[in-house]
Image (spheres, grey):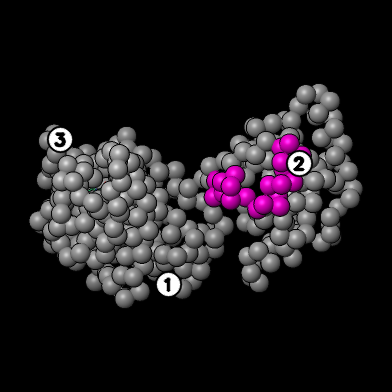
Amino acid sequence: MTDEYQPQEIATVQRLRAELDANGKKLVFTNGCFDLLHAGHVRYLNEARALGDALVIGLNSDSSVRALKGAGRPLNGQNDRAEVLSALRCVDAVVVFDGERATALIEAIRPHIYAKGGDYTVDSLNPEERAALQEAASDIRILPLVPGRSTTGTINKMAGEKAGPRLRIAVLGSGEGSNLRAIIAAVENGTLDAEIAAVISDRRDSNFLKLGEESGLPVHFVDPGSNPRKLGEAAQKEIFDHLRRARADVIVLAGFMRILKEPVISAYGDRIVNVHPSLLPKHKGANAPQLALEAGDAETGCTVHLVTAEIDAGRVLAQAKVPVLPGDTSETLHARIKIEEHKLLPQVLREWQERGLPVRGAGES
Ligand code: GAR
């Protein structure tokens, strides 16, 4: 295999396309570096293959991976990467290509369907590639990325293990888990040097818990007890035990809708943060976006603050403002607040860590 387009391989794929076409079947094409194959890649490729009847991968050559990802990449050479990909049952052919874009390959293959990972939208595709796809009348399909699986994440994990322990974060939540997703993304893309050591929820059926599970993180459901609003004593103790076992340095309440009490509050002192959808001290408690609407506020926002025994009252670490727009419902307003939360929470954790705080978990000497 050379660093050039492979005319023979391309001719084979063109024949495959013609055959499929003649039988009313569809060729799916995707492209990427596939440097360190992980379960996220495999699931993505299986889904891509399921869109049609054969899957062809355009594989970035070594020089093009270097240009895209920097001097230390690829970790594996193009021949090895092609060999591993070709061994997958869902892959029909692999063609190595040079340059940062797959435009010429798209023009040569004219795939019926083009699949791309969910960190893109149709609009954010490279314009050249998009034009080639439009010209070939390819159906562009964006597939969701598998959370918690990435080459960069794996590389960071290995580097972190060599460099010594990183900040260990425990995340507690009860709801959708979008803030958890933002923390996972920050860890994955290397902007937050941390490890998510525990994901804990009082809701067994929450998306929050499901996301933790799908991301391969250590998840714990804690039965909150019989009171629908309070967290029973046994649950408070169980959470404490999970935190200790996870050797958590920091506890993040990301949509955790019950009140943490002893023994966690004393043991973790100034190392618990909460994200709240208002500009505290305004609108404490549940339904903060609705309260901002009812109060006729022109702007609201979100707050990341330290947690104390008193609800939504600890020291404010950071805030971001969000305008209230005409016609806003509590859902539309909350959705825009969350966009800000997803930036603010990882940013606070990053700053906190860079200042060297906090460093030790309860139970450690
Ligand atoms: C977030 O908006 C968070 O600020 C809020 O719950 C939402 C959880 O969303 N927390 C509170 O209201 C706490 N008083 P998520 O599950 O999608 O991260």
What residue would you read off at disc 3? 228
Query: Does 130 sit above or below residue 98?
Result: above
In the displayed structure image, the side of residue 319 where residue 115 appears, left or right:
right
Residues in magenta?
118-138
In the displayed structure image, the side of residue 88 where residue 316 appears, left or right:
left
Mark 1 or mark 2, which has the lower sequence index? 2
Asked whether the residues under the numbered discs 3 and 1 touch, taking CB atoms below 8 Å apart as contact, a structural biologist would say no
Query: Does 109 sit above or below residue 351?
Result: above
Q: Residue at x 71, y 37 (%)?
A: 138
Q: Residue at x 72, y 62 (%)?
A: 64
1 or 2: mark nearer the eye: 2
Badge 2 marks a residue whose secondary structure is: helix
What residue would you read off at disc 2? 135
Q: CA distance from mark 3 to mark 1?
A: 42 Å
Amino acid type, mark 1: Gly
What residue would you read off at disc 1? 164
Amino acid type, mark 2: Glu
Q: CA distance from mark 3 to mark 2?
A: 57 Å
